[in-house]
Amino acid sequence: MAKRNEDDPRRFLDPKVIARITQLELRARQIVEGFLSGMHKSPVYGQSVEFVQHREYMPGDDLRRIDWKVWSRSDKFVIKQYEAETNLRSYVVVDASESMLYGIEKHRKRGTLYKYDYVSTAAACLAYLTTKQQDSCGLITFDEDVRQVIPPRSSTTHMDAITKALHISKPKAKTDPMKIMRRVAESMHSRGLVAIFSDFLCDREALFKGLEMLRHRRHDVMVFHVLDDDELTFPFSGMTRFEGLEEQPHLLCEPRSLRDGYLEALEEYLVEVRRGCTKIGIDYNLIRTSDYLDAVLSRFLFQRMATRAAPVRR
């Protein structure tokens, strides 16, 4: 086995390494710092005074931001763009229903992250990354009802409130997606970015109606569909007892007889969720608990840049 390079920042993104760091805020800090040190420069713009580049003027932009010197030379309207150009408001929405406990004993024995640990770490990373860029981030955790609500703030001390809320919200109960998305929409009084972490083992019709409500209110929505590796590959053999979660019954069976049917049903389900999100203009990402967290951070940064570049919709 190749020796791990201790100077490689990606080591902080490995779920096995992350699982050994017990404090959630420290996990997030380690991961984000490692991620950013692996980039030449974070491509996110905030509120400093350092000029970065021009971009084309869009309807709704502040006319005072137009670079008139460029206009006088080229007859083109362009906007000066600075680091941290706007204060983006975002919410990280985390599923704390009972199905997020799947595989918890297996992962604890292996020293890896089960689903809720994984999404909590990812959510804390996005919150830390956001506040580090001087933007504001809030948190909502949910099962069949909203469990914790932390309003968006941009201070670095805000991370303490977010990580405490994630720690308190231990998974239980079922998921009511329509009710939750309505509460998220009501909590956001102006257009913002919503990043949702869930396994989406719920009623899909209610889910899509809830997501469509957020899009109707002009929010940019990202979905991180997080599943355990075993849920995606069904590697079981020999007589196995499957324990039901969220009021589902237990099942004792020979899994090889179910594997083909399970994988076929799984593929139909994944296609349904992906197409449903795409149809209403939502950025969909399938994530497994063994994935490096740079996949999550990279997608989040990309979507934030796209949100900033988009014209203000009125």
Image: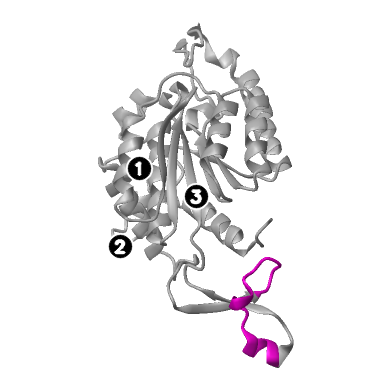
Rendered position, 233 above or below 274 = above
Q: Amino acid at mark 2?
A: Asp
Q: Amino acid at mark 3?
A: Ser
Q: Earlier in the sequence, mark 1 or mark 3?
A: 3
Q: Pointer 1: residues within 10 angstroms few (<14), some, or many (20+)? A: many
Q: Are marks 2 and 1 in contact (CB under 8 Å)?
A: no
Q: Residue at x 53, y 24 (%)?
A: 234
Using the rendered view, name the quadrant where residue 108 is placed: top left
Residue 236 or residue 63, whichever sits in front: 63
Q: Position of residue 258 (x, y in %)?
A: 59, 15
Q: Amino acid at mark 1?
A: Ile
Q: Earlier in the sequence, mark 2 or mark 3?
A: 2
Q: In the image, 246: left or right of 202?
A: left
Q: Nearer the viewer, mark 2 or mark 3?
A: 3
- Tell me the distance, in whole angstroms, between the alpha carbons under discs 2 and 1: 29 Å
Is residue 65 part of the magenta span, yes or no?
yes
In the structure shown, which secondary structural element does the residue marked by tag 1 occupy?
helix
Q: Pointer 2: residues within 10 angstroms few (<14), some, or many (20+)? A: few
Rendered position, 250 above or below 188 = above
Residue topped by disc 3:
90
Q: Residue at x 49, y 17 (%)?
A: 237
Residue 281 or residue 20, whichever sits in front: 281
Residue segment shown in magenta: 56-72
In the structure shown, which secondary structural element does the residue marked by tag 3 occupy?
strand
Q: Earlier in the sequence, mark 2 or mark 1?
A: 2
Using the rendered view, name the quadrant where residue 266 is placed: top right
* Number of the label disc, if any, that sits on residue 162: 1
Residue topped by disc 2:
7
Is residue 58 part of the magenta span, yes or no?
yes
